[in-house]
Amino acid sequence: MSCYERAFRRWVLVRLLPRAASARLIMMNRLALTVLWSAALLTPCVAQELAVKKGPTVTMAPAPLTTVTRGKSNSVELQFRVAAGFHINSNQPAERYLIPTAVKLDPPTDLVVGKTTYPPGKESSFAFAPDEKLSVYTGDFAVTVQVRPLASVLPGKYEIRGKLRYQACDNAQCYPAKTLPLQFEVKVVKAPVPPAKNPPQSPHEHR
Amino acid sequence: MKRDPVVILVVAMVVSLMLVFAINLVRHAPRKASAIQLNGQAPDFTLQALDGSSIRLSDFRGKVVVLNFWATWCEPCKVEMPWFVELQKQYGPSGLQFLGVAMDDASPKEIAGFAHDMGVNYPILLGQEAVGDAYGGVQFLPETFYINRDGKLVDRAFGLKGRGEIEDHVKKVLGLTGVAKN
């Protein structure tokens, strides 16, 4: 029996309650009652429908503002979470036909994105192939990207956008590859001035 | 009975919100495989096979067709394929025909390489979204549809099923229920 059928049955039961029991209700607007009952009964069905429609997801935790030094390569860590019950291929899947998880960033002109470091996949077997080990990510995982602002860039906040491509499966089925939009900010600062060495003691330099 | 205008306003708002929500849900929700009617005619299609030929589903009328939507990136699909190969060998003479529909972004050459590696002995067709839509959207893989000799869709399986279950489906549609397994 579908959720909608169950809701309909509950609705019929409510409508068929003895009038004596609903004497107080009759005082109220019947139309209002009908609509509000329908809304209350259908809400779980709609929520269930949406949950099914949502399917497997990977989400990115809001990245804290990372301070990056101008002219230097800085690490920025991006945190992701795979929804419970699902797994996605690691960046180095066990087989060449599998779709790797990959981050692609599109930085502003004055920022250069360097090497992206992925965590090693967890070697796991699944019910559909108990003898086979797959390299996957489940739960939380982090990807580190190197960001190098050019020496000429003005200090300030810069937004970097990009995407995470992944392909998820559960224990019995796989879902087409999806793309998660990414967005985080970095704060570019000037390189700290190196501490001055012992200044010459006399106006004349001695070599 | 005097109606409270506040109540009427609240009711109107709830109804409006529900209507907007329902319309949005119907417009954007992909068609579900469950919406495909069993015992109805299986949606016909023509797709290109890996060898370049065109294959039409209705050309197999008179045979039992097991239509399997799969992809090279789908590990559970890969698990099923050797079973399909065995069942095709075993029940092919009884009128069984497996058809694989690759719902893949990979090139035909890569798909052909994969099928070759798996020893596939049945036609692999290059899937199109429209065909997937006709079978309910194929929102995940594998999805398998069982079509009887009259071209009617009589059974379906979503996700990976056990070999025994697949064979039971095949035997049932072939009308071989009760025949001992080899």
Image (tube, rainbow, N blue to C red):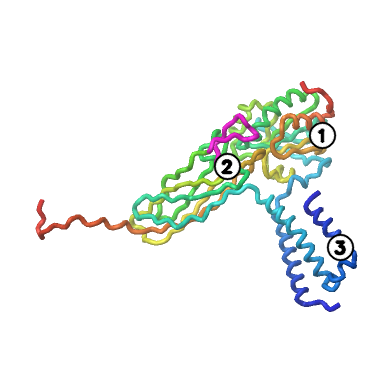
Q: Position of residue A152 (x, y in %)?
A: 34, 57
Pointer 3 indicates a residue of which chain? A
Q: Which residue in the protein does label 3 denote?
A: A15
Secondary structure, mark 1, is loop
Give the mark toward the camera: 3 or 2.
3
Amino acid type of the residue tagged 1 in the rendering: Asn
Secondary structure, mark 3, is helix
Q: Position of residue B146 (x, y in %)?
A: 78, 35
Amino acid type of the residue tagged 3 in the rendering: Arg
Give the mark toward the camera: 1 or 3.
3
Magenta-colored span: A122-137
Give the mark toward the camera: 2 or 1.
2
Q: Which residue in the protein does label 2 denote?
A: A88
**Above-or-below relation of A108 to A56:** below
Pointer 1 indicates a residue of which chain? B
Q: Position of residue A115 (x, y in %)?
A: 42, 45
Q: CA distance from mark 1 to mark 3?
A: 45 Å
Membership of A116 in magenta stretch: no
Residue B167 has which mark? none
Asked whether, in this view, residue B158 is left or right of residue A31, the answer is left
Q: Which residue in the protein does label 1 denote?
A: B148
Q: Residue at x 9, y 53 (%)?
A: A206
Q: Residue at x 84, y 78 (%)?
A: B2
| Disc 3: CA contacts within 10 A as few (<14), some (14-19) or many (>=20) | few
Pointer 2 indicates a residue of which chain? A
Q: Is residue B26 at least partly visible in the picture? A: no
The numbered mark, 3 or 2, whose residue comes first in the sequence reads 3
| Disc 2: CA contacts within 10 A as few (<14), some (14-19) or many (>=20) | many
| Disc 1: CA contacts within 10 A as few (<14), some (14-19) or many (>=20) | many
- Asked if both marks, 1 and 3, belong to the same chain, the answer given is no
Question: Where is residue B135, by image quadrant?
Answer: top right
